[in-house]
Image (spheres, grey):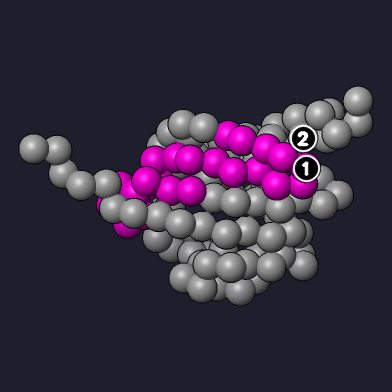
């Protein structure tokens, strides 16, 4: 079946992107995963691929742990713990992929409260 293989490939692409780039900070690989024609829906990350990369470096964005990765068709959703400027967030990403690259990106995040 082609669709499950494609979905598996998309999920694997996102896992590699989050591990290599967003966790291990190999930003020289960013352009391998993110399309020049990226449509970014999170205004805080900017509008372009370059904006997203610069924001991630300037704010020390680090994906500490990816809890879940789900995929359907060209979409992949991840739930992670992400540190931005040393603040922990529960972080959801929605990625749309085409031709093996991220072409669209949505996020939703919430600060992880301190433990009592």
Asked whether 73 or 31 is in front, the reply is: 73
Location of residue 40 in the rendering, given as x and y in whole percent from the top left corner: 62, 67
**Image height of 50 relative to 64, above or below:** below
Q: In the rendered view of the protein, which quadrant contains the C terminus? A: top left
Q: Is residue 9 left or right of residue 64?
A: right
Q: CA distance from mark 2 to mark 1?
A: 6 Å
Total label count?
2
Classified by dominant secondary structure, the portion drawn in magenta counts as strand
Between 37 and 8, the one nearer to me in the picture = 8
Q: Residue furthest top?
A: 1
What residue do we see at 65% from left, 71% from top? 48
**Label disc, if present, on residue 73 of the rendered structure:** 1
Residue 50 in magenta?
Answer: no
Residue at 91 percent of width and 31 percent of height: 2
The residue under the point 69% across, 68% down is: 39
- Going by the picture, which residue comes out furthest to the right? 1
Q: Nearer the viewer, residue 6 or 81?
A: 6
In the rendering, which numbered label is found on residue 7?
A: 2
Which span is picked out in magenta? 69-92
Residue 50 percent across, percent down from the top left: 63, 67
Residue occupying the point 51% across, 57% down: 107
Q: In this view of the protein, can residue 66 be seen by the observer? A: yes
Q: Quadrant of residue 110?
A: bottom left
Q: Is residue 22 above or below residue 57?
A: above
Callout 2–callout 1 Cβ contact below 8 Å = yes
Tell me if I can see residue 31 in this picture.
no
């Amino acid at each position: 079946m082609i669709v499950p293989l494609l979905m598996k490939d998309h999920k694997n692409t996102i896992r590699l992107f989050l591990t290599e780039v967003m966790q291990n900070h190999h930003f020289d690989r960013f352009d391998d995963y993110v399309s020049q024609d990226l449509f970014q829906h999170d205004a805080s990350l900017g509008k372009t691929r370059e904006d997203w990369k610069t924001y991630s470096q300037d704010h020390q964005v680090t994906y500490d742990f990816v809890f879940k990765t789900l995929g359907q068709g060209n979409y992949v959703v991840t739930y992670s713990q992400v540190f931005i400027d040393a603040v922990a967030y529960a972080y959801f990403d929605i990625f749309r992929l085409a031709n093996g690259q991220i072409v669209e990106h949505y996020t939703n995040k919430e600060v992880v409260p301190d433990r009592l």
